[in-house]
Amino acid sequence: MNLLLSNDDGIFAPGIRALADGLAVAGHQVTVVCPDRERSATGHGLTLHKPIRAETIESLFHPQIRAWACSGTPADCVKLALGALLESSPDLVIAGINHGANLGTDVLYSGTVSAAMEGTIEGIPAIAISLASFGDVDFRPAARFAQVLVSHIQQQPVDSAMLLNVNVPACPRHDLKGCKITCQGIRRYFDQFERRIDPRGKVYYWLAGEVVQEIEDAPHPEWDPATTMAVKALSTDVAAIQQGYISITPLQYNLTAIRGLTELQTSFDDIDKLFARFIADMDHTS
């Protein structure tokens, strides 16, 4: 397959090398476009007010891999690759291997997930893969699972509007319990801003935080009973990792709150009256 790889840990991160080299050895055509430095937790930010530069990188990856270091964000990297660097569209976009989990609400901040989601937005199936540890540096199990997953997708393609968010426990192979299709959980953090003073006497803040609560999302009220039961039977990504399972969570870029549509249709039963009040207020104040 023709694969485009990116990450948010930067071009020199060990996770991207393990991922790219393993896929190249498996016979895939691999192109790497990554940030030129650490870009974690940048979300889906884009660079709009300054130029984006891309530098060819040699002798870092497998000889068959083409690689660039990009001055932009992870989303910039994928957007630039698809719009300027690649001669043809890839079959699959893969972001990772991230050094640390991307579980629950982490996906809203993750540069790794955002890089993969940029592929999904362009109609290309995508995978975000993370090693669920900030301490462990053995990316080989996650890299091997990526190879198996890509091979499976090659035989059984997934919906191009779907992103697979994969998290791999950082444990020895014999401790892995299996693989689960999961729902996105919810992680609440206790955010703490540490106040510091620089050598020139200026105040600055350093953000730190830790997970204090992990909960399951409530079922959508418009789901039919069969759907509700099916979803409730699934584990969350957070729980799967805690239990030693590899989690695969399907994500999408459409963030419409479906149940909110029903609620708003009830609370705004006559939307035309709301607009008329707005126009009247504008006329009164002008």
Image: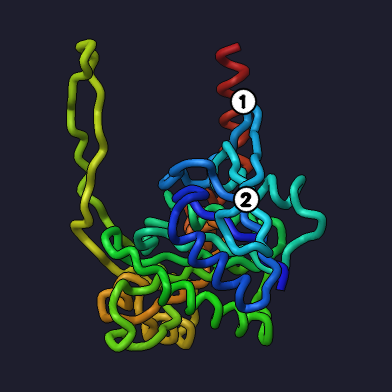
**Badge nearest the viewer, 2 or 1:** 2
Q: Residue 29 in the image: state x and y as whole percent.
A: 70, 68
Q: Is residue 78 above or below residue 143?
A: above
Q: Quadrant of residue 153?
A: bottom right
> According to the image, label 2 marks what residue?
58
**x%, y% of residue 138?**
35, 69
Q: Quadrant of residue 199?
A: top left
Name the residue carrying label 1.
Answer: 49
* Residue extending furthest toward the right: 87
Which quadrant holds the C terminus? top right
Where 241 sits versus 277, above or below? Answer: below
Q: Is residue 274 left or right of residue 156?
A: left
Q: Is the residue 9 above or below the residue 245 in the image?
A: above
The quarter in which the N terminus is drawn is bottom right
Q: Residue sitting at 23 percent across and 47 percent down? A: 209
On residue 176, the disc is none
Image point 69% across, 45% down: which residue?
80
Q: Quick check: 13 left or right of 245?
A: right
Q: Residues within 10 Å of mark 1 (few under 14, many from 20)?
A: few
Circle 2 SS class? loop
The one of 27 and 212 positioned closer to us in this rendering: 27
Q: CA distance from mark 2 to mark 1?
A: 29 Å
- Within 10 angstroms of label 2, few (less than 14), some, or many (20 or more) residues? few
Q: Please indicate whether residue 209 sits to the left or right of residue 38 in the image.
A: left
Residue 116 percent across, percent down from the top left = 57, 59
Q: Residue at x 53, y 53 (%)?
A: 114
Q: Quadrant of residue 141?
A: bottom left
Q: Secondary structure at mark 1?
A: loop
Residue type highlighted by circle 2: Glu
Is residue 262 among the parts visible in the rendering? no
In the image, what residue type sits under mark 1?
His
For image coordinates 61% across by 85% down, the residue present is 152
